Image: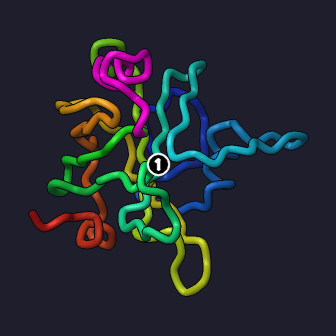
Amino acid sequence: PLEGLGSEHPLELHGTYTMNMILSAIGRHKVDKRDSFREGVLYLPEQQTDVFFITLNKSESDYTETTLYDDYAINETLFHWQSQSRTTDTSPTGQRYINQRKHKGKVLLFARAYKQEDGFTSLYTCLGLADYVSHKGSAPISVVWELRDGIPGRLLGVASKAE
């Protein structure tokens, strides 16, 4: 099970999920109301949790120039992630990322290799909770996160970026 979120939820570390399953598990979808979330980042203020939905291999036909973020595994526990293009290092959101450890915020990562595979929307793998290590730049901010648990082997090869 995925530990450290502080509330009851059905998520499992390295489990695979649709976006709707994740939104239900974290309380965004309710029986009588479905959230219309479409972005790659979601902040849950009541849980002090940032949830990131990462597509590792982005196609220019599926993403705009401003959303072709450079997200990749540095190794099995370090992950390079870019914020939304309009997020600066001095903005409240940027400061929340940079000061995540200090303020005891949580960062939860979900990743998938491609947006679609074989004509179907790809499932996200729960990479678990991560902690801030360092950052560079602004708008977007490039952040290095340290995963509390390693990236599963089935995703590590596609998540890594040859430098």
Q: Which residue is drawn at 40% across and 17% down?
A: 91
Furthest toward the left, the residue is 163
| Residue 13 in sight here | no
Examine the image and state in which quarter residue 34 appears.
top right
**In screen coordinates, is 139 left or right of 118?**
left
Q: Is residue 126 above or below residue 57?
A: above
State the image coordinates of residue 33 (x, y, percent, origin top left). Answer: 85, 40
Examine the image and state in which quarter residue 143 appears.
top left
State the image coordinates of residue 134 (x, y, percent, origin top left). Answer: 17, 31
The tally of labels here is 1
Furthest toward the front, the residue is 65
Q: Which stretch did the figure color magenta?
A: 85-99
**In screen coordinates, is 104 left or right of 163?**
right
Query: Residue 163 or 25: which is nearer the viewer?
Result: 163
Q: Residue at x 57, y 61 (%)?
A: 17
Locate the C terminus by quadrant.
bottom left
Examine the image and state in which quarter residue 90 appears.
top left
Residue that numbered label 1 is attached to: 1
| Residue 139 in sight here | yes
Q: In this view, does 87 lie above or below 118?
A: above
State the image coordinates of residue 12 (x, y, percent, origin top left). Answer: 49, 52
